[in-house]
Amino acid sequence: MPSIANYRGIIPAISCPFTNDHRIDEPALRKLASWLAGHDGVVAIMTNGHTGEVFSLTPSERAEVTRIVADELRGRMPVISSIVCEGLAEAAEHARAAQAAGAVALDVMPPHHWLRFGFTPGHALQYFEAIHRAAPELDLVCHVYPAWTRASYSSQLLAELARLPYLQAFKVGQRDMNKYARDIQAIREADASKAILTCHDEYLLASMVQGVDGALVGFATFIPQLIIDLWNAVKAGDLKKAMAVQALITPLKDAVYGGGEPTGEAHARMKGGMYLAGVLENATVRPPTEAPNAREMDALRAAVEQAGLSKR
């Protein structure tokens, strides 16, 4: 039985607030988690994603982020934690730590040495199985990387993963619309019960209309209501309204992502936007990620004001 009853909707990949001296800001993280969970249409929260600057966090800090968010949302909303590791034993340790911290599902990113060396389908299946064995009570979510990387999953492999009984959802970010459509079809044909969630922060409307079940995106930690409004319009088949909402999102998207894919500096710009919108009191990022420069902050300020979100 799935450990999360409903993946269909919006799942923010939560940002991780830091103090000026780069420690995890627990009060700010609790406040952000509670604020996100208060939006009708948000169905879960994910910790330790790229938006959460996971690569700057030690293993114990990753567990601490999950513990804080899970404790704050206990009884209100399920928490998913990403697993970002290189090997089977390490991934198993992280899975057990996330479960102990309160996660009820695990988002499985590809090991990053695959980006350099590639992998075989057997490698991927072993990786998922090792994580499942370490935390068998938890659902797994398959995090699909861009098609241009060597860690991209084939449609055939995605179908095999969809047949795994413990894998309940896919976070799909191919950045190639032809492959995106083929992969959605392959997953649906393998097991139509599995949830498919776009993670194309930088082109939400175009990816939402492909027949997915929602979005699992870092951008939703900044503008959850706009993304919920967009998703509701898509579900209702109201293209005119969806395009109007996307028109509000696009300047924010351009200011954060700069016309490209998510990057560390994009997540820093997102924190800058969250500060301007009053979502965060402190936009500190951990080095070596660099804070937005004055020109980037001006662009963020203009976009936030245009969307009617400015609080500073």
Image: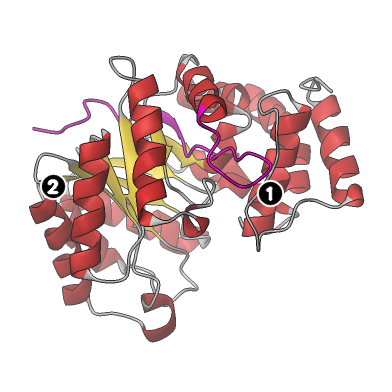
Q: Which of marks 2 and 1 is nearer the N terminus?
A: 2
Q: Mark 2 points at which residue?
A: 135
Percent across and percent down for residue 6 are 27, 26
| Whole-number angstrom distance, CA of label 2 to CA of label 1 | 32 Å
Residues under numbered marks 2 and 1 in contact, where contact means CB atoms less than 8 Å apart? no
Q: In this view, does 142 lie to the left or right of 306?
A: left
Q: Which residue is drawn at 35% across and 50% down?
A: 60
Looking at the rendered structure, the kind of residue marked 2 is Ala
Under circle 1, the secondary element is helix
Q: Which residue is drawn at 33% across and 67% down?
A: 153
Q: Mark 1 points at which residue?
A: 268
In the displayed structure, 85 sits above or below 291; it is below
Looking at the rendered structure, the kind of residue marked 1 is Ala
Q: Residue furthest bottom?
A: 117
Percent across and percent down for residue 90 are 24, 65
Point out the stretch of residues depicted in magenta. Answer: 1-26
Q: Looking at this view, is 234 or 285 the one in front?
A: 285
Q: Quadrant of the C terminus?
A: top right
Task: Answer with the quarter of the image where residue 87 lies.
Answer: bottom left
Q: Looking at this view, is 239 or 10 the one in front?
A: 10
Percent across and percent down for residue 277 are 74, 25
Q: Quadrant of the N terminus?
A: top left
Q: Which residue is drawn at 27% across and 37% down?
A: 101
Q: Main secondary structure of the magenta part?
A: loop
